[in-house]
Amino acid sequence: MNYRSTRGGVASVDFADAVRMGLATDGGLLVPEALPSVAPETLEEWRRLRFQDLALELIGPFVGDALPRADLADLIDRSYATFTHPEVTPLVEVGDAWILELFHGPTAAFKDVALQFLGNLFEYLLARDGGRLNIIGATSGDTGSAAIAGVRGKERIEIFILHPQGRISPIQERQMTTVLDANVHNVALRGTFDDGQRLVKALFSDLPFKERYRLGAVNSINWARILAQMVYYFYAWGRLAERLEGRPVTFAVPTGNFGDIFAGYLAKRIGLPIERLILATNRNDILTRFVASGTYATGEVYATLSPAMDIQLASNFERYLYYLVGEDPGRVRSLLEEMGRTGQLRVTGEEHAQVQADFAAVAVDDAATLAQIRATHAATGYILDPHTAVGVRAGAGRADLVCLATAHPAKFNEAVRQAIGREAPAPASLRGLMDKPTRCAVLDADIATLRDYIGETLAGRP
Ligand SMILES: *Cc1c(COP(=O)(O)O)cnc(C)c1O
């Protein structure tokens, strides 16, 4: 299987190159040149597969000849061996809906499903094809810890994660700084999250520095992340298939950068019988406004109780746009040019009708999020995290509903306490974090300081 850019400037790279490239070199996102399809009979046969075996069947066609099947199977098995639940992503019945628990990985949030796989894949490709990778990223919370957990201790990879000193939750900070592997470099910046993002951007646009230190990113646009996330939509359907008696299923997806829900869209396109994808946002509702109006326009970013969804622009949105306009890179480019020029883009009436057929979008504010945590707990005893609560509220009243649970509630205990007056019990991965030893450099938010730090850290490495 080969990949091309949504903007048309990259063509016919194989899966390994698509993974290595991350962002396409023309600034677009990589997508398959053609999508495989899963026949209904095949879907029936896959109903009882273990998560890992299902992942191999689903991801295999997208990998094509780039990796031997046995190697892919081994990568998948190792990636999900770090999950504490034997089903990896179990489906549990809560009231009149189903909750798909995606938080049994090392950092208790759904990003582990993709980043455990991506870390192993990077390591495999570097060992096979040579080279080294130095990952640099800025985080305001969840992504940093999941990325660190994905590559800790891996050969040929170093990771530098910048977080704003004192401005992330103590648990999130400890989830990163208690990882003592020699290839993990935490940096607390004397500054804000925006300072961190600005510095990372500056490093990546310093091409000589980028080349010399082989810098790479682990942002949410890597195609391998989308593939890993597609698997649990099929898995959930398989667990429910008998009860559904042929009816399609509806998924409610707490959405920020559009990676998770795009994986659901992909699942539907290749053959999973999905009735509706419910795009659930918090007060940061750029995507909800797009579905309602057909115009995608940036707005202000608000801090909410579901911080992993506090975004202004959804980085995976361009992939959906590509499919919406009939896989036409020229049209994608002109829409993005319009966006760059005017701060907004507008699709045609026909396309807008298609958007509304693909998604039902609902924005849920903090008050409604807390009310949902309270209501679900009162009715069933189950504790939702605030991100998951946004999805549950957005999907309320729908039949055959599966809500994606994107974080363990103990990660967001402040909101949980506000809602129900007590905390959720912590899973093993979050216990004892405050007592463990930590390692972290504290630096001024200044490009020269950061460059020096990276240079000195990597000086003794091959
Ligand atoms: C990242 C994240 C989301 C949003 O997922 P996207 O793929 O960015 O849409 C939702 N909930 C939690 C807990 C997250 O960490």
Image (spheres, rainbow, N blue to C red):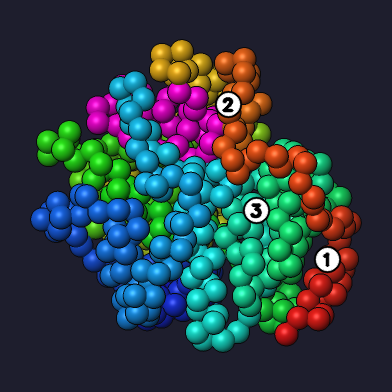
Q: Which residue is mark 2?
A: 424
Amino acid at circle 1: Leu
- The stretch in magenta equals 382-409
Count of all numbered marks drawn on residues in the image? 3
Q: Is residue 286 above or below residue 65?
A: above
Q: Which residue is mark 1?
A: 450
The C terminus lies in which quarter of the figure? bottom right
Q: Is residue 27 above or below residue 39?
A: below
Amino acid at circle 2: Ala
**Circle 1: element type:** helix
Amino acid at circle 3: Gly
Residue 389 screen position, x and y as percent = 48, 28
Q: Any magenta on residue 399?
A: yes
> Which residue is painted at 76% across and 81% down in the image?
461
Q: Residues within 10 Å of mark 3 (few under 14, many from 20)?
A: many
Residue 58, located in which quarter of the rendered image? bottom left
Q: CA distance from mark 3 to mark 1?
A: 17 Å
Q: Nearer the viewer, residue 84 or 411?
A: 84
Residue 241 screen position, x and y as percent = 19, 40
Q: Nearer the viewer, residue 111 or 86?
A: 86
Mark sitting earlier along the chain (3/1): 3
Q: Which residue is mark 3?
A: 144
Q: Is residue 271 left or right of residue 448?
A: left
Residue 422 screen position, x and y as percent = 62, 18
